[in-house]
Amino acid sequence: MEVRQPLEAMFTSTEWLHSAWGKKSEVKEIRKIILNDKFWATVTYAILSTRPLVQVLRFVDAEKKTAMSFIYNAMDEAKEMIAHNLGGEEASYREIWDIVDARWEVQLHRHLHAAAYYLNPQFQYSEKKSSNPEVKLGLYHCMERLIPEQADWELADLQLVLFRNKEGIFALNAAKSTISKRSPGIIILVNARHFIQF
């Protein structure tokens, strides 16, 4: 939007109007567009609704491989930012969210992404953590698939309570001090002989 005023000034300047360019019929049509408030409202809407998605694309396209949990979080934050940018009224952002969700569900959103998000301490212990039920549902779908034995599944589920509440091994200073420094993931003790790395 920082270009609006200079563009309008250029197209309304005496120098422009008397130039060879200013007299061309197609340029006069462009001038009408530039001076139209509806055009700038559309430009503003496009910027506010796409900038968060472009930021996610740049994040995902970075040279460093991005962990699934961070992608999940970035998409969640992008959608929230779109809603915020468009005034928080669902009618103003719902169509965009539906388009994003349609692409996200088909191409990237999987139970594993939700599980990785849930098990990333940086998000689990954040005040802005997602409370969307699909996150925990994704985690449980992954656990059912990865942990075949009922007793092991129950033990892992009980350890999730410790993880969520920062109890047991998760209460140790070593664990707390590395929340934002270590790679995402968590090791859950299934029994005395087996660990599951998420």
Image (cartoon, rainbow, N blue to C red):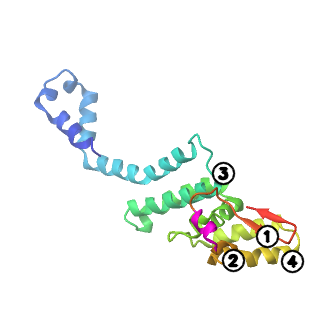
Q: Which residue is mark 2?
A: 168
Q: Where does label 3 land, which residue?
A: 107
Q: Nearer the viewer, mark 3 or mark 2?
A: 2
Name the residue beneath numbered marker 4.
151
Residue 147 falls left or right of residue 61: right
Q: What is the crowding at mark 2: few (fewer than 14 residues within 10 Å), some, or many (at least 20)?
A: few
Q: CA distance from mark 4 to mark 1?
A: 12 Å
Q: Nearer the viewer, residue 37 or 100?
A: 100
- When asked about the image quadrant of residue 122, the answer is bottom right
Magenta residues? 172-179
Q: Secondary structure at mark 2?
A: helix
> Front-most of 29 and 127?
127
Of circles 4 and 3, the one toward us is: 4
- Residue 104 falls in which quadrant of the image? bottom right
- x 84%, y 68%: residue: 147
Q: Which residue is mark 1?
A: 189
Give the residue at x 56% y 70%.
Answer: 125
- Is 177 within the magenta? yes
Nearer the observer: mark 4 or 1; the answer is 1
Give the alpha-carbon distance from disc 1 to disc 2, as whole Å: 12 Å
User: Is there a contact, CB below 8 Å, between mark 2 and mark 4?
Assistant: no
Q: In the rendered structure, which amino acid carries the disc numbered 3?
A: Gln
Crowding near the residue tagged with mark 1, few <14, some 14–19, many ≥20 C-alpha atoms within 10 Å: some
Circle 4: residue type: Ala
Number of numbered callouts drawn: 4
Disc 4, SS: helix
- Comparing marks 1 and 2, which lies closer to the viewer? 2
